[in-house]
Image (cartoon, rainbow, N blue to C red):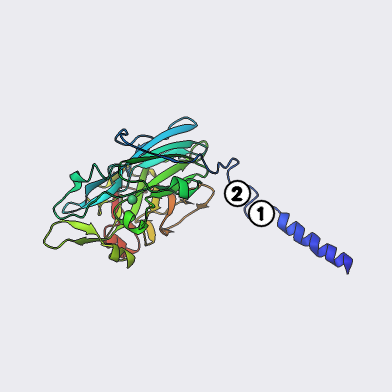
Amino acid sequence: MRSLTVFIILIIFCACNAPNQKYGTSFGAPPANITSGAPPANITSGASPTGIKGPLAYAPNVPTAADGDTIEVKFDVQHKTFHIKNDLAFVGWMFGDSIPGPTLKVRVGQTVKFSMTNRSNDTMAMAMDAGAQTMQMPHSIDFHAAMVNPEDKYRTINPGETIHFSWTANYPGVFMYHCGTPMVLMHMIYGMIGMVIVEPTGGFPGKPDYEFVLIQNEYYLRKLQDSITYVPDVEAARLKEPTYVTFNGKVAQYVPHPLRVKAGSRVRVYFINEGPNNASSFHVIGTIFDKVWLDGNPHNELQGLQAVYLGPACGAIVEFVIPEKGRYTFVDHSFADAEMGAIGQFLAE
Ligand SMILES: [Cu+2]
């Protein structure tokens, strides 16, 4: 009986300590050096330099990473009229100057010395369209790429205040950022969303011919009575009934203005579904994703996918070859979303 007990304990011990036979011991393992936490955030008030700063670019452009162990990144939050198509504008709340906000690129191991000023007070006047509901508003930022105490770093700041904190990138991939001030749903449908790309040490494997950022989001809008102005509709957002769904903030913008590539070229798309509510099934008509890195981490590679299905706050880096000349329409293959604006084209010449 005693020897049987020892045998069973030995079996359990071996099972718990065996290397992962399917994936190998290092596959998907966390990076060697995880940096958790950072010094406390601090909040200042008074004048601060206007504008954004850092390795940033607006979608569909991909920013270039900066060298150095520490990089300085500065954001502004402003309230400003934003056209989501020619005849439809609303007063958005935005990081930087657009919806989505600027894409930030960092490298694994880099520390981001971040600051952000809430300018909703001094940009309010510019945003005062007839009848538009606009106001001074507290805001914050939540970086999914960071591992820090959210109660400290992601706290809400008042108009005129600047928050300063740092965080270190641990995992490669594509991550969202967004305003986390309650009601979060409201702040997100007003436009407070964006992407961080974290490059692995030594860069992402492979060298595509073209790279683009595509960020999907939903808009929930209603027209004000007797007005040409639209406002975000929180009730529609609670019901998950979008008015428009877009790539990079504007309805079907890459149909009249397609993303141009050469026939036979390899394309990499940094993709994220910012929601806030619905899933995305990203698909490019006429080709197949030969590489998909879920959440943008090369460890999470899938091959030969027709579409990549991503819930809110999920991303992927996808690569594919444009086989020959032509127009290659890309959609959220949940076709209601394509009808609502989540459609664009690559033009291969
Ligand atoms: Cu906000």
Q: Position of residue 292 (x, y in %)?
A: 46, 51
C-alpha gap between disc 1 and disc 2: 9 Å
Identify which residue is drawn at 23% across, 43% down.
123
Direction from residue 23 to residue 70 in the image, left or right: left
Question: Dot 2: few (<14), some (14–19), or many (≥20) neighbours within 10 Å?
Answer: few
Secondary structure, mark 2, is loop
Q: Position of residue 91 (x, y in %)?
A: 22, 51
Whether residue 46 is situated above or below residue 341 in the rendered picture: above
Question: Dot 1: few (<14), some (14–19), or many (≥20) neighbours within 10 Å?
Answer: few
Q: Position of residue 116 (x, y in %)?
A: 36, 40
Direction from residue 257 to residue 298 in the image, left or right: right
**Mark 2: is the Cβ under 8 angstroms from ligand 1?**
no
User: Can residue 209 be spotted in the picture?
Assistant: no
User: Can residue 75 be spotted in the picture?
Assistant: yes
Q: Position of residue 127 (x, y in %)?
A: 19, 47
Say whether marks 1 and 2 touch (CB < 8 Å).
Answer: yes
Whether residue 3 is situated above or below residue 123 in the rendered picture: below
Q: What amino acid is labelled 2 in the image?
A: Phe
Q: Quadrant of residue 88?
A: bottom left
Residue nearest the viewer, comparing 119 with 177:
119
Identify which residue is drawn at 35% across, 55% down.
286
Residue nearest the viewer, comparing 143 with 175:
143
Residue hosting label 1: 20
Identify which residue is drawn at 39% across, 36% down.
73
Furthest toward the front, the residue is 45
Furthest toward the right, the residue is 2
Secondary structure, mark 1, is loop
Q: What amino acid is labelled 1 in the image?
A: Asn
Residue nearest the viewer, comparing 220 with 105:
220
Residue hosting label 2: 27
Identify which residue is drawn at 47% across, 49% down.
150
